[in-house]
């Protein structure tokens, strides 16, 4: 199977995972990216079975609306039963690097409001140590150089993602050459730098379920 076919397979499995729990008042948390898009597309035939969605990006919100799915502001809904999203890297503890599409901050906020985080990914994303994928850090624009110097101090090679403005009006620095031994500690350390909005390590709030697509099928991995 190609990578796109594997992404489609995990999107299908995610639908199977949530479908039994859909009720008329259900609001789903929806992620961003090519894998999340495949999941969004598969929601269309189910759209009369649930109330709508909260999206982690303007792009996902537009895609949901184009399929006739209502999109709500996070502030207008309570706890979400599920958050479904892809990842750039995921380890055996279901900790992730996210933000390759610059949506990390809203993703982290929506994920924080969800009872269950279902990560959908093809096997190329599954790693023994996080950090081969450059770790994104969202920064307030005026703090960019300061934050970059602090990142050097932590051992990263920071690269400004030219031309990218996040949905929150901020900028992204990608941390190269930054293998992460302790994701939980590093997530907190990066968030403590003044000017950092958030970073792409999802360690404190990792996934609860990983649907991982490989040539043998879709493996379901949980934290407990
Ligand atoms: O900002 C983007 C998100 O974190 C995506 O979920 C992540 O980059 C994975 O995207 P894709 O499914 O396209 O590989």
Image (cartoon, rainbow, N blue to C red):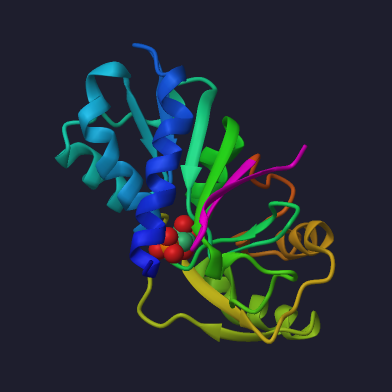
The answer to whether residue 138 of the structure is visible from this angle is no
Please, is residue 156 above or below residue 192 in the view? below
Q: Residue at x 21, y 29 (%)?
A: 45
Using the image as rendered, state which of residue 48 and residue 122 is in the foreground: 122
Name the magenta segment's main secondary structure.
strand
Question: Looking at the image, in which quadrant does ligand 1 appear?
Answer: bottom left
- Return the residue nearer the eye: 5 or 168: 5
Residue 164 visible in the current orientation: yes
66 left or right of 170?
A: left
Q: Nearer the viewer, residue 217 or 111?
A: 217
Quadrant (top left/top right/bottom left/bottom right) for the N terminus:
bottom left
Rendering quarter of residue 132: bottom right
Q: Position of residue 123 (x, y in %)?
A: 55, 64
Residue 128 placement (x, y as % from top left): 74, 69
Q: Residue at x 68, y 87 (%)?
A: 177
Give the total number of marks visible in the rendering. 0
Q: Quadrant of the C terminus?
A: top right
Above or below for 159 versus 134: below
Q: Quadrant of residue 114?
A: top right
Residue 144, given in percent of the width and then of the height, sits at 57, 76
Q: Is residue 129 left or right of residue 81?
A: right
Q: Is residue 68 above or below residue 179?
A: above
The magenta stretch spans residue 213: yes
Which residue is located at x 79 percent, y 64 percent?
A: 186
Residue 157 among those drawn in magenta: no
Which residues make up the magenta segment? 209-224
Q: Residue at point 16% right, 31% down?
A: 68
Q: Residue furthest top?
A: 24
Horizontal and vertical percent position of residue 60: 31, 48
């Amino acid at each position: 199977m190609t990578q796109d076919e594997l992404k489609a397979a995990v999107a299908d499995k995610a639908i199977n995972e949530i479908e039994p729990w859909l009720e008329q008042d259900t609001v789903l948390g929806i992620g961003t990216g090519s894998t999340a898009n495949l999941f969004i597309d598969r929601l269309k035939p189910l759209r009369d079975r649930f109330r709508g969605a909260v999206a982690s990006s303007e792009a996902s919100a537009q895609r949901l609306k184009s399929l006739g799915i209502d999109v709500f502001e996070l502030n207008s809904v309570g706890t979400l039963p599920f958050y479904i999203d892809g990842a750039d890297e995921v380890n055996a503890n279901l900790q992730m690097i996210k933000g390759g599409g610059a949506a990390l901050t809203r993703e982290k906020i929506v994920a924080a409001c969800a009872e269950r985080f279902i990560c959908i990914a093809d096997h190329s994303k599954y790693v023994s140590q996080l950090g081969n994928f450059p770790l994104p850090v969202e920064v307030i624009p005026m703090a960019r150089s300061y934050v970059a110097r602090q990142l050097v101090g932590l051992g990263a090679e920071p690269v400004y993602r030219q031309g990218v403005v996040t949905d929150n009006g901020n900028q992204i620095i990608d941390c190269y050459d930054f293998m992460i031994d302790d994701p939980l500690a590093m997530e907190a350390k990066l968030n403590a730098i003044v000017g950092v909005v958030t970073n792409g390590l999802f360690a404190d709030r990792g996934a609860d379920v990983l649907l991982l697509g490989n040539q043998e099928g879709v493996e379901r991995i949980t934290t407990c």
